Image (cartoon, rainbow, N blue to C red):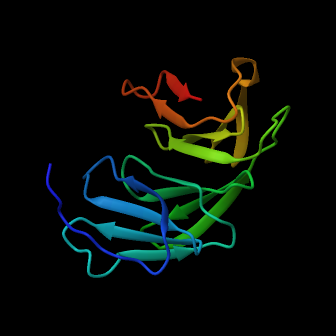
Amino acid sequence: AHKLHEYTTKSPIKCATIGPKSNRVIATGDSSNSIQIWTVGNFSSSVASLSQILPISTLDLNPSETLLLSGTPQSQVNLYDLSSESFVTSFFSSKPNSTSTHNSSVKFHPTSQFFAAGIGDQIQLFDIRSKTQIQNYDCSEKDWDHIKSLLFSPDNGAWMISIG
C-alpha cells in the first residue's frame, strides 16, 4: 500500500466511505456537519459539497455511487442524490425497546432499494421507495451497547451481518 494523496479540511473528519463500484469516489463527513464528495486523483476540489443541520456519525454510498446515506446520532438517516447534489428525504427510527438512539452504521442493500441502520441495539431496515421502516431486529439480548457495523452478503444481499 502507498499513499495516494493527503489533504486537510477545515473541520476534523468524523467518518468516510469509499464507493463500491469504482473505488474512486470518497465521501467524508466532518465535525461541522459538512459532507464532501471527492474523486481519487482530484483532491484539489470536491465534486460535491452537502451540509446538514445534525451531526454526521456514519456514511454509505450505494453500489452505483449515485446515492448517499448520512446517519446522525439522533436516529435520523438522510438520503442525498449525488447526481443533482441534493437532499432527497429523511428517515426516522421508531426506536422500539432501544436503550440507545445512537446511529452508528448505515448500509445500502446491493439493490439500492433498501438500507439498514444500526440504531442503538436495534437494526432497522428501510424501504427507500416507500420511505418506510419495514423491519426491526432487536439485538438487546446480545448485550451490545450499539451496532458497530452492518454488511449485506454479495449474493444480492440475501444475508445481513451485524457486529456489535
Nearest the eye: 8 or 36: 8
Nearest the eye: 138 or 67: 138
Q: Residue at x 69, y 67 (%)?
A: 54
Quick check: 74 left or right of 28? right
Q: Residue at x 66, y 47 (%)?
A: 103
Q: Residue at x 46, y 73 (%)?
A: 84
Q: Position of residue 64 (x, y in %)?
A: 36, 51
Q: Position of residue 22 (x, y in %)?
A: 25, 52
Q: Position of residue 33 (x, y in %)?
A: 59, 71
Quick check: 125 left or right of 84? right
Residue 153 sits above or below residue 2 on the image: above
Residue 70 sits above or below residue 126 on the image: below
Count the numbered circles shown. 0
Nearest the eye: 6 or 115: 6
Q: Residue at x 52, y 36 (%)?
A: 149
Quick check: 104 left or right of 122? left
Quarter in which the C terminus is drawn: top right
Figure quadrant of residue 114: top right
Quick check: 101 left or right of 69? right
Residue at the extreme left: 2
Nearest the eye: 164 or 126: 164
Residue at the extreme top: 141
Q: Position of residue 8 (x, y in %)?
A: 35, 76
Residue 25 sits above or below residue 99 on the image: below
